[in-house]
Amino acid sequence: MLKILHHYNDRFVSKWLVLAMDIFIVIFAFIIATAIRFNLDFRYLDPSIFKYHLLLVCGIKVICFLLFETNVGIIRHTSFTDAKQILKAMVCSTGALIIGTNFSKFSTPKLLDIPTSILLIDFFVSVFGLVVSRILIKYIFDSLSSSFKSDKNVIIYGAGRLGLMTKNALTSGSPANQQKVLFFIDDNQQKTGKSIEGVKVLGKEEAKRIIRSMKYENVEIIFAIQAISTVRKGDITEEFLEMGVPLRIVPPMEDWMNGELNPSQISKISIEDLLDRPSIQINNRLVKDFIEAKRVLITGAAGSIGSEIVRQVLRFDPEELILVDQAESPLYDLETELIRLKNGKKFKARLHVEVGDVTNVSQMGKLFQRYHPQVIYHAAAYKHVPLMEDNPFKAVEVNTLGTEGLADLAVKFKVEKFVFVSTDKAVNPTNVMGASKRLAEVYVQSLNSLHHVETRFTTTRFGNVLGSNGSVIPLFRKQIERGGPVTVTHPEIIRYFMTIPEACQLVLEAGTMGKGGEIYVFDMGVPVKILDLAEKMIKLSGFEPHTQIKIEYTGLRPGEKLFEELLSDKETTLPTHHPKIMVARVSSHNFDEISNELIKLRKDINKMSAREIVQFLKYMLPEYISNNSPFEKLDEVRVGDHQEE
């Protein structure tokens, strides 16, 4: 029997067979109702008339069954919705019969005159028979198929509406894919001790005692709470991870497929879900007024930051969006994604996708001539510290001269706003990458001192972004998937972290602020110890750090420091209208001096050695002191020269 059931568990009964079953129940129910009405004394029953009564009742009910589609539901998945449809069909059919038979008394009283009392009794008997038959079949099927259900035990954290929807998603579908929900966990004491659809609700401490008792094996917890702070979620996660219980999380409802939760969408909790910071809110009206109906150009559009800026800008209805990147394949992937959204009428903006290099001033000039952008988000950059330490030429060419050329074009074509995406590594730089970005900041900032410049230049500065291309999170994930070891440069190294959407939201809002020349600094929250991050990611993957997955220390990389700063010693901040955005008070620089030096650099850079390029950066930025780098020798020379003076 079980083999047969297993073979047919993905096949469903024909809706016509269900209708035939319902007709049989209706016939039987009408006979029962008639027998009850006459106290089981069939002497009062005229068979020659009864057959017409039975035919009329069946005919009307079949019409209502088809009208309300009571026969199309899958019986093994019978729910309250199916019962409601049956009730609607029965109310409609019984009402029609009562009205019809009462009118028939004036014409053919014997042939179609069914006593109202029989019809009322028949209503209750039929509803009972139709609903109970479905529940009984569902119960039998579940009982027989339980032997080959998934042996995974699930605990749902959250006994609200989302928790109930999660439970129904996990317990429906084919038996082999169904999961057993042991109980709910909820912090609301008014719910604890009660049951929801036969599943008990427990408090957190009681649930932890049951889990510790080893009563259940192969258990996991699913978070089904949306309205919970990240900090609170992190605390709860930490408690259960210490017990060795894996956790998964239900995605936001707007991400559900066709408005329904698919169990495959319930994914493992990621480190991004546990970032210890409250969610960021931006002034959408302010951003919309700034972007709506504008021509917006985004450089580095295919990168992790640039592509998210693209997605968020589209929400505010720009007139045109010009996407520029030199990475062909990622740019193609982004274009494909956006075309799909546009075909789905998710946005109206005209898209222009351009493969281009920001260091090619001639090419960029043609783009400006063609599109005349009004707003620019400049996110194109080389960002990997060790790689740029080995390639100072590319760091300066792209990060500094690329920004300079783009900024000059913005001035020439009277762009309204130029938003430069910078980094915390530009503060007291210890590496080539940070120094190249800092020099770009200096140039962009100095442009605002020129009276004839109509473009407002704004710089945004933030720390590491969780999950961005080449960041530590994807690296750790790959290392864990390979079984380790996970490599950490230093046991005491700390970093500020922000999610990609958070960073881009703040970039958009900061872009609406100020009169130009400001450097906006984001509140990055509490810095995170990279070692703690690695340990938590290992636990989230279901392993024990240092035993099942080793952690190795590789030493600081060239140009790397133990902690990053968002402000230099000479800078202070002032608040803005957004609590997470501050404006840095930085020293101003003379445009002519900076411009003349960069003009000479652009002319000579192809002939300069790596050492000479770094010397130039150190000349322009006295605060640039190399750390853990071969270029530290240049600082010794600089100090020696100063002492001789």
Image: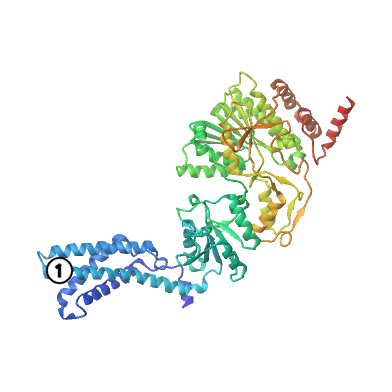
249 versus 193 height, above or below: above
> Picture coordinates of residue 130 (x, y %)?
32, 69
> Picture coordinates of residue 433 (x, y %)?
72, 37
> Is residue 138 found left or right of 404 in the rendered image?
left
75 versus 40 height, above or below: above
171 versus 404 height, above or below: below
> Is residue 310 found left or right of 615 in the rendered image?
left
Query: Which colouring convention does the figure follow?
Result: rainbow
Q: Secondary structure at mark 1?
A: loop
Asked whether 140 or 69 is in front, the reply is: 140
Q: Residue furthest front?
A: 189
Q: Amino acid at mark 1?
A: Asp
Asked whether 412 or 437 is in front, the reply is: 437
Q: Is residue 261 visible?
A: no
Q: Split into 4 quadrants, where in the image is the C terminus?
A: top right
Q: Residues within 10 Å of mark 1 (few under 14, many from 20)?
A: many
For label 1, the residue is 113
